Image (spheres, helix red, strand yellow):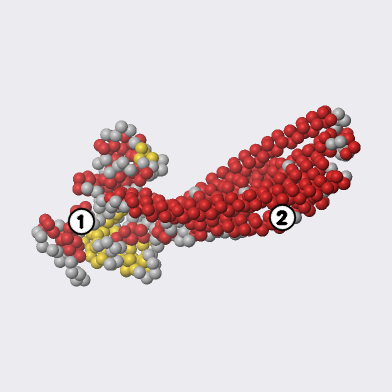
C-alpha cells in the first residue's frame, strides 16, 4: 500500500529534510545558482541583438531607429552586422558553457547527496530489529534504497535548480517583452489561462498514470523476487507456463499505465505548441498593423517571436518538473518513514561494554510471545554452567529457536529475565553481547566474494593461518585445497555452486575462526547428507571444546553426548537430563527417540504418540 502514496507537489517539512543532504555541498549549489541566473539573463540577449541588427541595418533607411549602443556600432551595415553577430556568437557560447557548468555541478552534487542518503539507509537498515524484517518484504526495502533514491537524485540534479531556471527565464522574458511592447505582451499572455487549464488537466492525467505505474512496478519487483528465488520449485512442479501467464498480467498493468502516460504527453505538448502558435499568429496580425502604422518596428516583432518560443518552452518544462516534484515528495515520504523507524532493541545508555568473568547463562521465568498473548515460551527457567554443552530438542514450534533469539536479544522477553554472568542481557552493549556468540544456522548463508571472505566475514584480525586451521578442524580443508584457487575461490550469490554440506561446513569454519565464547548450533545438521553429518559430528567435538554450547537439533544422533538435554514442548521446558536419563523417564524424549529409530529398535510397530504424562 505504501507504493500508492502519490505525495504532495510541495511539502515544506520533507523539503527541509531533503535539503539537509545538499548542505555539505552548498558551495557547488551556490555556484550552480549563479551560473543559472547568468544563463537565464543571457536568454533575453539573443532576441535583443536580433532586434538591434534588423532595426539598425536591415530595414529601409527611413525606418531605422536609434539604439543605446549606436556609439559602439559601426555605421557601415556589413561591419555593424559582423559586430552584432560576433556578440551573438559569444552569447551563445557563453550560454553553452554556463549550462554545461550548471548541469555538471548539480549532477555531481546529486550523486554525492544520494551516496550519503543510500549509505544512511543501509546503516539504518542494519540497526533495525529482526522483527521489522519479519513484517516488511525485502523487495520493498530494496526499492527504498534503489528506485526511490533515484527519484530524489532526479529532483536534486535536474529538478529544483532547473525549476528556478525556468522561473527566471519566464520572469526575464516577460520583463523584456513589457519593455519592448505592452500590447504584444498582453496578446502573448492572453493564451495563458488556456495553457494553465491544459496544464492542470495534464498534471491530473499524468499523476494518475504515475500512481498506477508505481504500483505496477512494485508488483513486478515483488513477483520477480519471489519467483527467481523459488526457481527450483517452479521448475520442479512445471509452473513455468502458469508463472509466465501471471507475470504477463502484471506486466500488462505496467504497460497500460505507461501507455496512458504516453497519451497524456502526446496531447499536451502539441496543444501547448498550438496555443503558442496561435499567440504568435495574433502577434503577427496585430504587429503587422502597427508596423504599417509606424508605431512598431520590424525588429521588435521579430524579437517577440523569439521571446514567444523562450516563453512557452519553460512552461512545458515546468509541467514535466511537476511530476518530478510529486514523485520526489512521495519517494522522500517513504524514505523518511523508513529512517524514522526506530529499533526497539538498543543498547541502554549505561551499557555494560566489558564481559564479566562468569559465563553462566540463566533463564529466569521467561515468557515471550511474538504477537499479543500468543505465548511461544511460558515460564521457562534453566541454568547453563560455563563450558557445558546443552542440547535442545522438541517438536516443531516448541520454542527451541526462540530461546537463542532471546539470548542474543533479537527480541526482548515480555516477562522474566535472561542473564549472562549474572547480568541481564538487556544491560549489555549489543555489539559486546553478540560478539561473544558464534552461530551456525540451519540454512547456511554465504555472501558474494571468496571462501576466505566468507569465513573471515569482515573481521580483519582473522589471519590466513586461522582460516586454514578452522577449515581443517571442521573437515573442510581437503576440499578447499583441491580447488584451483583454494581460499580465493569465488563464491557466487548465496553460495551457488557449492553443495549444502559444503556451505554448512563453511559456516562451521566461520564460527570457529571467530573463536566465540558461546556457540549456538540451530538445526545445523538437518539439511546435510549422512556422510556430511558424520564429518560435522566429528567437528562438533572440536567446536564445543572449552565453550558453552547450545545445540538445537531434530536429529538426536548429533546430541547424545551433550552434558544435558532440554526437552521443549508447547513452549515449556518439560524434561531435563542426559540421553540415558531421558530415555529412562520414558517421556517426550523417549517418544522422539522412538519415532526416529523405530525401524532399528521397534521394527515396524507404530510408536505411541499419545501425550506424555507430566513428570
Of 349 and 286, nearer the camera is 286
Can residue 343 be seen here? Answer: yes
Label of residue 192 in the image: 2
Q: Is residue 615 above or below residue 404?
A: below
Q: Is label 2 in contact with label 1 (beta carbons under 8 Å)?
A: no
- The quadrant of the image that shows the C terminus is bottom left
Which residue is rendered at x = 77% and y = 45% of the image?
A: 304
Of 446 and 478, nearer the camera is 446
> In the image, 251: left or right of 288?
left
Name which quarter of the figure residue 593 lies in: bottom left
Can residue 348 be seen here? Answer: no
Residue 224 rendering spot, x and y as whole percentages: 40, 51
Which residue is rendered at x = 56% and y = 44% of the image?
A: 111
**Disc nearer the start of the sequence (2/1):** 2
Secondary structure of the residue carrying tag 2 is helix
Crowd rating for badge 2 (residues with CA inside 10 Å; few <14, some 14–19, many 20+): some
Q: Is residue 516 above or below residue 491?
A: below
Q: Residue furthest right?
A: 62
Of 61 and 474, nearer the camera is 61
- Tag 1 residue: 556
Label of residue 58 in the image: none
> In the image, 55: left or right of 456?
right
Which residue is rendered at x = 39% and y = 61% of the image?
A: 411
Amino acid at each position: 500500500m505504501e507504493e500508492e502514496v502519490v505525495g504532495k507537489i510541495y511539502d515544506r517539512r520533507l523539503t527541509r529534510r531533503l535539503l539537509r543532504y545538499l548542505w555539505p555541498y552548498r558551495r557547488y549549489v551556490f555556484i550552480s545558482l549563479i551560473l543559472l541566473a547568468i544563463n537565464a539573463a543571457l536568454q533575453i540577449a539573443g532576441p535583443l541583438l536580433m532586434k538591434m541588427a534588423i532595426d539598425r541595418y536591415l530595414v529601409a533607411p527611413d525606418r531605422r531607429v536609434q539604439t543605446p549602443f549606436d556609439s559602439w556600432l559601426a555605421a557601415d551595415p556589413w561591419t555593424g552586422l559582423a559586430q552584432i553577430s560576433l556578440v551573438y556568437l559569444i552569447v551563445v557560447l557563453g550560454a553553452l558553457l554556463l549550462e554545461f557548468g550548471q548541469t555538471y555541478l548539480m549532477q555531481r552534487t546529486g550523486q554525492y547527496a544520494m551516496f550519503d542518503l543510500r549509505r544512511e539507509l543501509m546503516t539504518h537498515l542494519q540497526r533495525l530489529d529482526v522483527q521489522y524484517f519479519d513484517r516488511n518484504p525485502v523487495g520493498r526495502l530494496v526499492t527504498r534504497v534503489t528506485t526511490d533514491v533515484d527519484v530524489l537524485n532526479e529532483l536534486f540534479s535536474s529538478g529544483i535548480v532547473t525549476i528556478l531556471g525556468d522561473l527566471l527565464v519566464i520572469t526575464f522574458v516577460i520583463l523584456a517583452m513589457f519593455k519592448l511592447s505592452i500590447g504584444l505582451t498582453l496578446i502573448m499572455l492572453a493564451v495563458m489561462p488556456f495553457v494553465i487549464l491544459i496544464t492542470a488537466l495534464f498534471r491530473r492525467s499524468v499523476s494518475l498514470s504515475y500512481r498506477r505505474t508505481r504500483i505496477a512496478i512494485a508488483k513486478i519487483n515483488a513477483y520477480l523476487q519471489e519467483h527467481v528465488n523459488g526457481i527450483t520449485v517452479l521448475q520442479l512442479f512445471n509452473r513455468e507456463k502458469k508463472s509466465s501467464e501471471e507475470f504477463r498480467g502484471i506486466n500488462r498493468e505496467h504497460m497500460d499505465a505507461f501507455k496512458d502516460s504516453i497519451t497524456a504527453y502526446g496531447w499536451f505538448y502539441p496543444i501547448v505548441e498550438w496555443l503558442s502558435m496561435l499567440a504568435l499568429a495574433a502577434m503577427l496580425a496585430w504587429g503587422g498593423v502597427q508596423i504599417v502604422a509606424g508605431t512598431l518596428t520590424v525588429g521588435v516583432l521579430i524579437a517577440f517571436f523569439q521571446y514567444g518560443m523562450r516563453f512557452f518552452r519553460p512552461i512545458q518544462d515546468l509541467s514535466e518538473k511537476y511530476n518530478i516534484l510529486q514523485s520526489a515528495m512521495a519517494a522522500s515520504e517513504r524514505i523518511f518513514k523508513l529512517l524514522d523507524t526506530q529499533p526497539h532493541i538498543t543498547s541502554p545508555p549505561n551499557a555494560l561494554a566489558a564481559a564479566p568473568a562468569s559465563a553462566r547463562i540463566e533463564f529466569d521465568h521467561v515468557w515471550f510471545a511474538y504477537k499479543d498473548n500468543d505465548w511461544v515460551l511460558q515460564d521457562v527457567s534453566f541454568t547453563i554452567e560455563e563450558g557445558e554443552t546443552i542440547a535442545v530438542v522438541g517438536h516443531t514450534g516448541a520454542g527451541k529457536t526462540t530461546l537463542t533469539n532471546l539470548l542474543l536479544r533479537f527480541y526482548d522477553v515480555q516477562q522474566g529475565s535472561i542473564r549472562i554472568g549474572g547480568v541481564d542481557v538487556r544491560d549489555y552493549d549489543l555489539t559486546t553481547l553478540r560478539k561473544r556468540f558464534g552461530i551456525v544456522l540451519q540454512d547456511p548463508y554465504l555472501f558474494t566474494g571468496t571462501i576466505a571472505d566468507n569465513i573471515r566475514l569482515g573481521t580483519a584480525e582473522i589471519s590466513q593461518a586461522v582460516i586454514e586451521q578452522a577449515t581443517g578442524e571442521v573437515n573442510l580443508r581437503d576440499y578447499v585445497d583441491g580447488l584451483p584457487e583454494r581460499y580465493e575461490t569465488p563464491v557466487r550469490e548465496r553460495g551457488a555452486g557449492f553443495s549444502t554440506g559444503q556451505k554448512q561446513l563453511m559456516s562451521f569454519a566461520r564460527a570457529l575462526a571467530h573463536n566465540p565464547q558461546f556457540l549456538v548450533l540451530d538445526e545445523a545438521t538437518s539439511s546435510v547428507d549422512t556422510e556430511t553429518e558424520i564429518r560435522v559430528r566429528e567437528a562438533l567435538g572440536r567446536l564445543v571444546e572449552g565453550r558453552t554450547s547450545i545445540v538445537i537439533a531434530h536429529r538426536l544422533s548429533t546430541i547424545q553426548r551433550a552434558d544435558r538435554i532440554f526437552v521443549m514442548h508447547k513452549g515449556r521446558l518439560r524434561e531435563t537430563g542426559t540421553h540415558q536419563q531421558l530415555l529412562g523417564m520414558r517421556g517426550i524424549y523417549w517418544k522422539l527417540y522412538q519415532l526416529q529409530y523405530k525401524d532399528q529398535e521397534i521394527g515396524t510397530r507404530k510408536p505411541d504418540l499419545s501425550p506424555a504424562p507430566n513428570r
